[in-house]
Image: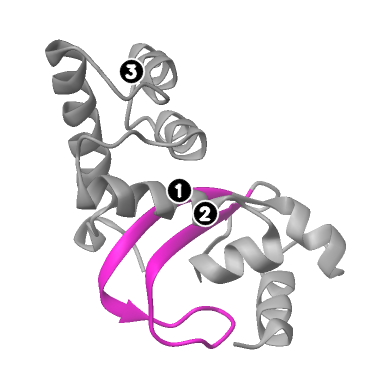
Amino acid sequence: MSENQLTTEIIARSVASTWEEAKLEWTLKEVYKEREPLTCLCGHFPINEICVLHNAQNGEEALVGNVCVKKFLGLPSDKIFAAIRRITEDETNALNAEAIDHAHRSHWINDWERTFCFDTCRKRRLSEKQMSKRIQINRAVLARVVNQLGNRKR
């Protein structure tokens, strides 16, 4: 993994010409798991937890590995993927705040579902109806995270 290569690639796709300014242009647009490994902008291969970054200044997008997004850009992708792993193992588990916010911003869940998730995320004992709703939301989130690359532009 090369921090220099990542820095060079991000700056090349940015309006700003310095790392400190360029990294502020980027936001986390999407996360997904890729079945076929990709190569991160830093050169690391393989990566399967993919983060799609969006540059608000020029509309550019970049596919970056989860580790680089967290380590160099400071975005919470690691917490989102931790929640995804947790609900993959047991769909009765709750999403964390970062995953809830990301799912809502990405329009995977609606306002009511966001509120429901926050209201119940710390609860261990849910009613049967609440648990059913949690599982339904978790399945909807997982369906969006599992790679749908056929629908994405590379």
| Residue 55 against residue 95 in the figure, above or below | below
| Residue 114 against residue 88 in the figure, above or below | above
The x, y position of residue 28, in whole percent, is 55, 50
Left or right of 150 in this view: 39: right
Q: Which amino acid does label 1 sit on?
A: Ile
The residue carrying mark 2 is 77
Which one is in front, 121 or 44?
A: 121
CB-based contact (under 8 Å), mark 1 and mark 3: no
The x, y position of residue 30, in whole percent, is 43, 50
Q: Which residue is drawn at 28% across and 68% down?
A: 34
Q: Which residue is drawn at 39% across and 66% down?
A: 49
The residue carrying mark 3 is 113
Place residue 109 in its image quadrant: top left
Which one is in front, 62 or 130?
A: 130
| Residue 4 against residue 66 in the figure, above or below | below
Determine the CA span between mark 3 and mark 2.
Answer: 21 Å
**What is the span of residues highlighted in magenta in the rendered image?**
28-55
Q: Which comes before the other along the chain, label 1 or label 3?
A: 1
Q: What residue type is labelled 2?
A: Ser
Q: Residue at x 68, y 56 (%)?
A: 74
